[in-house]
Amino acid sequence: MTDGWDWRQPGGAPAPAGGPGPGQPPQGSAGGTTSPWWSDALADPWRDPYAPAAVVVPAAAPDGAGEPEPVTDPDLPTRPGLRQVVLISLITALLAGSLGSALTYALMRGGDVPTLGAQAGQAPALAQRKPESLAGVAERVLPSVVTIRVASLGGISEGSGFVVSTDGHIVTNDHVVADGPGKATVIFNDGSTTPATVVGQDPESDIAVVKVTRSGLTPVQFGDSDALAVGDPVLAMGSPLSLANTVTAGIVSALDRTMQAGEPGGPTRYYAAIQTDAAVNHGNSGGPLVDGGGRVVGVNSTIKSLVADGQEAGNIGLAFAIPINQAKRVTEDIIGTGKARRTVIGAQVGGTGVTGGGVRLNAVEPAGPAAAAGMRTGDVVLRLNGHPMTDPTDLVALVRKYAPGSVVTVEYRRGSSRQNASVTLAADAK
């Protein structure tokens, strides 16, 4: 019985005709059992089809017989030859040598990398932060700017302020402290806090003064709000939305912007404001508006915003500050007497404008400034110191801009004639 396989002994001789019997090992040429191979190994039904095709059983070769023919399993990973080992070692050595040379060169060069950018020269003027630069102005003024918190039944009111005297007087808006019990907390530029007492307040001008007991304070420098021009650079400083030590920049957008402001049920405030496009938000109230020389020229007070009733207003580039000449005068009155004088012209104005422009005087006080200058009830004021009158608010706000005793020129119409008068403004009796 044959299985179709040509069995050979390790020496290469063919197996006997007919092959070995079932279960019998093949016979060598000398008649002995010399091959470890079994003729039915590949026909084994239990054989793993992925196992090597040969099973090697080591056995001692008979005397005089040659070594068994080596068999290589094609499925086993081959060991790298000497040539491969040498080649891999050579490549590794070359790479290591190159890396070592590069590192040595870098170390010898001090870790140099290509120079980025042009060679640095002297910093440009805008980057030197000179005292007259905006950065220099901010650095000089910020230590005098504070945050003011007032606790009331309605919650916490927070605004800004600035130091105006070495003994601790601080200016802010009346609406920042209006709902409080006369006490406040002042937070300084360095984060330290101290209690404060409200010295006095003037709701109609929206100016209030608080005082702290603290030494080493640096007051601000005052500028002249009457010397401002449209286009002058300004900085607004304070704590908008509780962000202390915030500085924003802009320009003077308009001067003598007459304002009538106030909360429902509260006092009506009139002032001829400095309009600016510097970003001002809730919390900036009471903070300083500073000119390019670092001098305070206004007190940030209110903003206009495109929001519906009940919504939170935000900056849209329309902010208004009380002129510092007015605010300083009111502050001096409050510190000196506990209350502020209100400047009046001695006349009552109508609630609506007049056709063709101007503001009609509904009543003139007999002993008031307007009457002393020859004006009468029914006269229509056209201009005050050159400013046109289009609404009653214009006359009230511009009059309160000036100090009592100031002389202003009033152009008015009586019937069909136009006349001019020099009016010496006065303080009201209250």
Image (cartoon, rainbow, N blue to C red):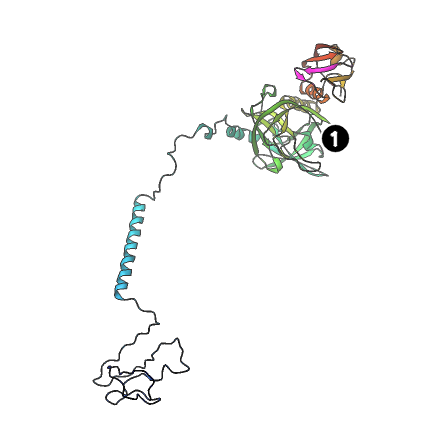
Residue 375 coordinates in the image, percent (x, y): 75, 11
Question: For mark 1, what is the residue?
Answer: 266
Residue 360 coordinates in the image, percent (x, y): 75, 17
Magenta stretch: give its range: 377-389
How many numbered callouts?
1
Residue 332 coordinates in the image, percent (x, y): 66, 22
Query: Looking at the image, is 323 positioned above or below residue 370?
Result: below
Question: Is 382 inside the magenta-drawn segment?
Answer: yes
How would you rate the neighbour count of disc 1 (Cα within 10 Å): few for under 14, some for 14-19, many for 20 or more?
few
Taking the view exactly as shown, the residue that stands out farthest to the left is: 64
Query: Looking at the image, is 144 positioned above or below residue 405?
Result: below
Query: Residue at coordinates 77% horizontally, 12% vertically from top-left?
Result: 376
Question: Is 264 inside the magenta-drawn segment?
Answer: no
- Viewer can see residue 233: yes
- Viewer can see residue 170: no
Q: Taking 310 as reference, is 31 left or right?
A: left
Q: Taking 185 as reference, is 354 left or right?
A: right
Indicate the amino acid at tag 1: Gly
- 286 or 13: which is nearer to us? 13
User: Which element type, helix, strand or loop, lies under badge 1?
Assistant: loop
- 404 or 52: which is nearer to us? 52
Query: Residue at coordinates 33% horizontally, 72% vertically from top-left?
Result: 74
Which picture quadrant has residue 374?
top right
Which picture quadrant has residue 118?
top left
Q: Where does the N terminus fall, quadrant-wise?
A: bottom left
Residue 38 coordinates in the image, percent (x, y): 33, 84
Query: Looking at the image, is 117 positioned above or below residue 274?
Result: below
- 57 or 126: which is nearer to us? 57
